[in-house]
Image: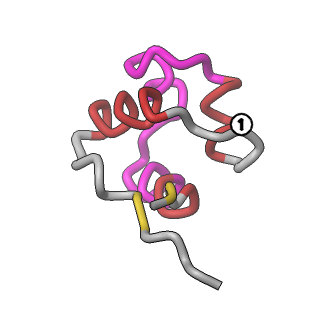
Amino acid sequence: MILDIVELKTYIEANGIKQKYIAEKANISEPKLSSILSGKRKCEVSEYANICNVLGVDFKTFVKEKEVV
């Protein structure tokens, strides 16, 4: 299973939620959250759980099955 960053970022933008708000409530620095959402940094499980909590979505919302090649 992998985190679908594109879906997460799309959800945040579509709902007009500010990254600053998410970072503050999820106890993640704004630069770190920005790096996660731009795909430059991996998201730790605890960070992802906090983000989901702030967004009020289920933990599985932005997780997809890893594609086998």
Total marks placed: 1
Q: Image point 43% across, 67% down: which residue?
A: 64
Q: Nearer the viewer, residue 69 or 23?
A: 69
Q: Residue 10, how many percent across, how many down?
A: 50, 60
Up-down relation of residue 25 to residue 48 (above or below): above
User: What is the quadrant of the C terminus in the image?
Assistant: bottom right
Q: Residue furthest right?
A: 40
Question: For the magenta stretch, what is the residue range?
Answer: 9-30
Report if residue 28 lies within the magenta region.
Answer: yes
Q: Image point 35% across, 34% down: which residue?
A: 49
Q: Residue 36, how many percent across, how many down?
A: 64, 40
Q: Nearer the viewer, residue 6 or 14?
A: 6
Q: Residue furthest front?
A: 69
Q: Image point 29% across, 55% down: which residue?
A: 60
Numbered disc 1: secondary structure:
helix
Up-down relation of residue 67 to residue 30 (above or below): below
Q: Residue furthest bottom?
A: 69
Q: Quadrant of residue 45?
A: top left
Up-down relation of residue 5 to residue 37 (above or below): below
Identified by mark 1, the residue type is: Ser
Colour approach in the figure: secondary structure
Q: Quadrant of residue 29?
A: top right
Up-down relation of residue 52 to residue 61 (above or below): above
Q: Residue 32, how many percent across, how many down?
A: 66, 26
Q: Image point 31% across, 58% down: which residue?
A: 61
Magenta segment, principal secondary structure? helix
Q: Nearer the viewer, residue 20 or 59?
A: 59
Report if residue 19 lies within the magenta region.
Answer: yes
Q: Residue beneath label 1, please?
A: 35
Left or right: 41 as drawn, with respect to 57: right
Q: Residue 5, how many percent across, how many down?
A: 56, 55
User: What is the quadrant of the N terminus in the image?
Assistant: bottom left
